[in-house]
Image (cartoon, rainbow, N blue to C red):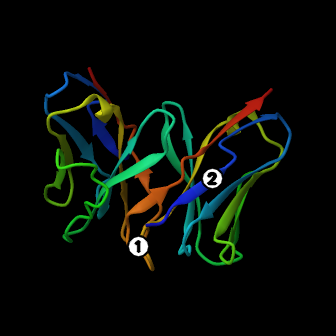
Amino acid sequence: SQELEQSPQSLIVQEGKNLTINCTSSKTLYGLYWYKQKYGEGLIFLMMLQKGGEEKSHEKITAKLDEKKQQSSLHITASQPSHAGIYLCGADGGYGGSQGNLIFGKGTKLSVKP
Amino acid sequence: GAGVSQSPSNKVTEKGKDVELRCDPISGHTALYWYRQSLGQGLEFLIYFQGNSAPDKSGLPSDRFSAERTGGSVSTLTIQRTQQEDSAVYLCASSGQGNIGKLFFGSGTQLSVL
């Protein structure tokens, strides 16, 4: 079955600094999804990447998909305290195509120091 | 309501008792997921329902766990003879047709088994 590994596990940055979170899949990616979880607020969908080389942005958050490396990176520019939370990547757990049982990495906990 | 609703929000039970957790997905969403999140762990996939198809139960950790979805809407996750290791937050999510990967999560049920 597919597994997603995220790095780093946790990250503390000073407000205003840039940062990158990585998600690497053990198998071919057929779509990669980024979510954010804040304490007491549940998980919020950020963005979906479906094609190799695809890049999407949401406010100051940019994510890219590298199909060859089976990897996605999420980059935050000029971090703010509101960016703090746990970022999780998700992907289809099947061996090919959409199977629906979306699996997730263990998450990266981001803290932003004001 | 407009979002995914889960009840109860908190459940404390004694070891060996059965518990039922309820999920009301967003109206019209065909896919429904159950996940488990233990302290410091990522999201563990449990079960996935899609329309009238047979559910994907591949993530259920033991035969003490079962789930059903009535009328393609409300779902109930049942844990029989609860064990202390079942303590976790149980999250439900739903997604619309053609939007696999864009999940809307409920706030979860915090289950504590004493």
Q: Secondary structure at mark 1?
A: loop
Dot 2 and dot 1 within a common chain: no
For disc 1, the marked residue is: B98
Which chain letter matches label 1? B
- Quarter location, residue B95: bottom left
Residue A84, position as x, y percentages in the image: 67, 36
**Residue in the foreground of this view, choosing between A27 and A52:** A27
Q: In the image, A67: left or right of B101?
A: right
Which chain letter matches label 2? A
In the picture, the quarter occupied by the C terminus of chain A is top right
Residue that appears at 36% across and 70% down: B97
Q: In the image, A23: left or right of B41?
A: right
Residue A82, position as x, y percentages in the image: 69, 35
The vertical placement of B100 against B32, above or below, is: below
Residue that appears at 70% across and 46% down: A8
Residue A17, position as x, y percentages in the image: 86, 41
Residue that appears at 26% across and 46% down: B24
Q: Secondary structure at mark 2?
A: strand
For disc 2, the marked residue is: A6
In the picture, the quarter occupied by the N terminus of chain A is bottom left
